[in-house]
Amino acid sequence: MRALCGTSGYNYDAWKGRFYPEKLPQQKMLAWYAERFSTVEINYTFYRKPAAKTLVGWAAQTPPGFRFALKA
């Protein structure tokens, strides 16, 4: 069951072994995160606009209704 909340980012090595399984590959972090939370803030959009390919990739890794809060 996913919590109706999220965090500021999801891709943190320090979370491995605490939140993520220790050996979870980095490219699978978003999907794992999205199974447990309903939204995530994307911080790097404050500095640069993500490519369309990146946005499509994020959407493919998350369930319907998952929300991305893009920092501007």
Image (cartoon, helix red, strand yellow):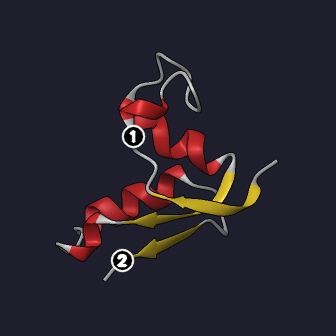
The image shows a total of numbered marks equal to: 2
Amino acid tagged 2: Lys
> Which residue does the numbered mark 1 point to in the structure image?
12
Q: Residue at x 43, y 57 (%)?
A: 58
In the image, is 16 to the left or to the right of 49? right
Compute the Cα span from label 1 to label 2. 18 Å
Q: Quadrant of residue 43?
A: bottom left
Q: Residue at x 69, y 47 (%)?
A: 36
Q: Residue at x 67, y 46 (%)?
A: 35
Locate residue 47, reporting x and y percent: 18, 72
Neighbours of disc 2 within 10 Å: few (<14), some (14-19), many (20+)? some
Q: Which mark is residue 59?
A: none
Q: Quadrant of residue 57?
A: bottom left
Q: Residue at x 48, y 33 (%)?
A: 15
Neighbours of disc 1 within 10 Å: few (<14), some (14-19), many (20+)? few
User: Circle 1 sits in a helix, a strand or a loop, which is it?
Assistant: loop
Q: Which mark is residue 71?
A: 2
In the image, is 55 to the left or to the right of 20? left
